[in-house]
Amino acid sequence: MNLCDLQPYTGKRVCVALSGGRDSVALLHEFFSRGKQYGIVFSALTCEHGIRGEQSLRDLGFVRDLCNKWDIPLRVFSACVPERAKKSGRGLEEEGRIFRYECYAEVLSSGAADLVATAHHEDDFAETVLFRLCRGTSLTGLASIGEYDGIVRPLLHVTRAQIDRYAAENGLSWVEDESNADTRYTRNALRH
């Protein structure tokens, strides 16, 4: 089973945003197993937020080991998002998102890649629409997750169930972010 269409990225340098979770590992594997036939030069980046302490460092170790095993160049970004959030007055989730997009912009502006690919999928899209509806967004805000400024989302038409099946068929390992089960975060409450 192919997870997504890689044709649009033919001849491009694509950097996959890799957290170590199932979705991003599956996306990286798709580029790893099929990217060369499209002339895609790919790499990975990871953003260590400093939010989950030892668990966060464990995830970083997993990502490093995976990229070493598959011989994929990896760029690591680190920040203390809790400190940043305290200084900015924003919530952890929002500050973490801002940090990730700063990392993506750095990769793109430095010329290290033509595109940054994130593993947002169809279920994330629906979740984001619900999240924005609950916050009271405009019709423009309902546009949800899109592609812009060199950020692409190859899995937007792929469901979580399809990703699960792909991961099982390919014997993929990943790490679970235990904070995803914490319903104190609005997005997680919606998801559950």
Image (cartoon, rainbow, N blue to C red):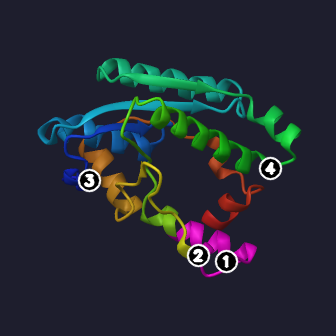
The secondary element bearing badge 1 is classed as helix
Q: Are marks 4 and 1 in contact (CB under 8 Å)?
A: no
Residue type, numbered disc 3: Leu
Residue at the image position 36 percent from the left and 56 percent from the top = 155
The label on residue 133 is 1
- Which image quadrant for residue 122? bottom left
The secondary element bearing badge 3 is classed as loop
Residue named by callout 3: 3
Residue named by callout 4: 91
The secondary element bearing badge 4 is classed as loop
Circle nearer the viewer, 2 or 1: 2
Between disc 2 and disc 1, whose residue precedes? 1
Residue 64 among those drawn in magenta: no
Between disc 3 and disc 2, whose residue precedes? 3
Tell which of 43 and 67 is nearer to you: 43
* Percent of width and height locating residue 78: 63, 25
Between disc 1 and disc 3, whose residue precedes? 3
Circle nearer the viewer, 4 or 2: 2
Tell which of 185 and 135 is nearer to you: 135
Q: CA distance from mark 4 to mark 1?
A: 19 Å
Between disc 4 and disc 1, whose residue precedes? 4
Task: Please provide the residue range marked out in magenta.
Answer: 126-141
Residue named by callout 2: 142
Residue type, numbered disc 4: Gly
Q: In the rendered image of this protein, does residue 69 appear above or below residue 161? A: above
Q: Are marks 3 and 2 in contact (CB under 8 Å)?
A: no
Circle nearer the viewer, 3 or 4: 4
Q: Are marks 1 and 3 in contact (CB under 8 Å)?
A: no
Residue type, numbered disc 1: Leu
Circle nearer the viewer, 3 or 2: 2
The label on residue 94 is none
